[in-house]
Amino acid sequence: MTDTEQMQKTLVSMTVNGVERSAEVESRTLLVHYLRDHLGLTGTHVGCDTSQCGACVVNVDGRTTKACTFFAVQVQGATVETIEGLAHDGVYHPVQEGFWEEHGLQCGYCTPGMIMSSVSLLKRNPNPTDAEIRHELEGNICRCTGYENIVRSVRYAAEKVRAGS
Amino acid sequence: MFPGAFTYSRPATVSDAVALLVDNPDAKILAGGHSLVPAMKLRLAMPSALVDLRDITELQGVEASDDSVTIRAMATYNDVRDHEGAAAALPILVEAINVVGDAQVRDHGTLVGSLVHNDPAADLTAVALALGGDVHATGPNGDRSISLDDFFVDLWTTTLEPDEVVTHVTLNRPSQHSRMAYRKFAHPASGYAIVGVAAVLGMDGDTVSQARVALTGAASTATRLSSVETAITGQALTEESVEAAIRDVTAGLTINGDQFAPEAYRAHLVEVLTKRALLGTQA
Ligand SMILES: Cc1cc2nc3c(=O)[nH]c(=O)nc-3n(C[C@H](O)[C@H](O)[C@H](O)COP(=O)(O)OP(=O)(O)OC[C@H]3O[C@@H](n4cnc5c(N)ncnc54)[C@H](O)[C@@H]3O)c2cc1C
Ligand code: FES
Ligand code: FES
């Protein structure tokens, strides 16, 4: 491969939190860097950078996605939802509210990914058991909470969503 | 982490994808990317071109018929798990998919990609082998089918040619009177199988009339446990018959050993999980 090919950039566009966004990136640019470095959406974190920890989780076309395990070019044309898109007009999403009410975080590093995974888990299963919550959050690692309050937070959100519907 | 640079393309048809592979022997197919992308980030793989299959509509979807389940190349684990026909016909798929990786891996990783990648600790390789069926591929010389029994060769190696694209896999649907199960002992950190055993049994009343039993995690590739298959066939499925059938289960196998699971420990797990899989089979 020649140097010019290596430097080649392509315009990658996608809908992020309801807004059309685009940036010129190399094909090897990861989605997480596209979001953080090119769009300035730094709510999505990089933890392990090796597909293990889930700090980078976003939703892509309704699928729960580790943004460190996708190239931005793969997501060209897709609809992406990040932590920044959850609250509306100063009102938290029920999952965010759950993490607040039930003390679902300590340092907060894992939290954006934890919340995004929980949002997609509740879309798939609005009434999960604790075991189902734990199983679906296996890809999200938390070094602080011991997970107990995270499970409570998701349960809180599930109840809130069910009560509201 | 940044992988080496590569050119990226999204062909619209299988023949365009094959043409791109023929043009550049260094190009690689990209499916869900959950094996390839981590390997590229670690620069264990440095393909100069990626051919992404995501726009090829004929590679999407799952179908269940009376005698088989067809899983197309871009069907993710969750697409398979959530397909009612496939889940009802082959409950072992649901059982195994639920213990693969995590929610993100299941939402993007493809079953076909797992077979092609042939990680020695993958789950669905053993399950596919226990069900039996065919891998269907398209290359520059046209289409061909490869029996799953002839597909897995060695660590990360299959009989697929580098310029072939797998379009789909057909998994056999056993007779009505069948029982199946997958049992896995997962690595506590990676979640991959230290040992996994899949068993698919045809039953004639209480007697095992047909058996396909496959092992993953323990050897360099998923492999059938033919001594167990032979020994259990014709027997009633009891604690005693299973104990007898697994007596020589590791004979002829080269069992992996590492810091976490030395050879003797893994060999023991092969016995335990083969027993659990056989006795745990359900209709
Ligand atoms: C955190 C994590 C945990 C995991 N845990 C498990 C686990 O517990 N058990 C398990 O079994 N797996 C596990 N996996 C691996 C996962 O199951 C595989 O990544 C996945 O199934 C492979 O499919 P893919 O679509 O991601 O393939 P890709 O990564 O896109 O491709 C894998 C390889 O197959 C080739 N390929 C893919 N599709 C085709 C095709 N149609 N034709 C020709 N070549 C093709 C590619 O060129 C590449 O070489 C895990 C992965 C991660 C990231
Ligand atoms: S940063 Fe993506 S999984 Fe850890
Ligand atoms: S709150 Fe600190 S890692 Fe989860």
Image (spheres, rainbow, N blue to C red):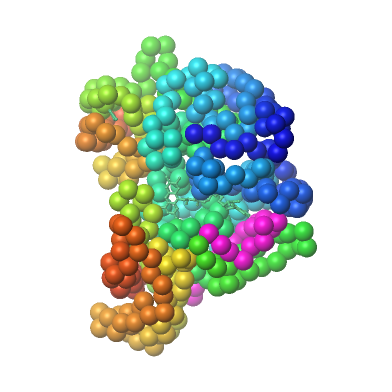
Residue sitting farthest toward the front? A3
> Is B46 rendered above or below residue A22?
below
Does B258 appear in magenta?
Answer: no
Q: In x, y percent, where is residue B65?
A: 58, 64
Residue sitting farthest toward the top? A89
Observer-nearest of B176 and B70: B70
Q: Is residue B269 visible?
A: no
Q: In x, y percent, where is residue B256?
A: 38, 65
Q: Quadrant of residue B240?
A: bottom left
Is B164 on the left-hand or right-hand side of B74?
right
Is A114 on the left-hand or right-hand side of B143?
left
Observer-nearest of B2 and B213: B2
Of the 4 image quadrants, the one containing the C terminus of chain B is bottom left
Observer-nearest of B181 and B188: B188
> Is B140 rendered above or below residue B5?
below
The residue at the point 72 percent across, 43 percent down is B11
Q: Is residue B129 visible?
A: yes
The residue at the point 42 percent across, 59 percent down is B121
Q: In x, y percent, where is residue B93?
A: 45, 60
The residue at the point 50 percent across, 69 percent down is B129
The residue at the point 73 percent across, 63 percent down is B143
Which residues are the magenta region?
A: B156-177
Is B68 on the left-hand or right-hand side of A115?
right
Does B157 appear in magenta?
Answer: yes
Q: In x, y percent, where is residue A99?
A: 28, 25
Q: Quadrant of residue A141?
A: top left
Residue sitting farthest toward the bottom? B234
Is A103 on the left-hand or right-hand side of B54?
left
Q: How many numbered marks are there?
A: 0
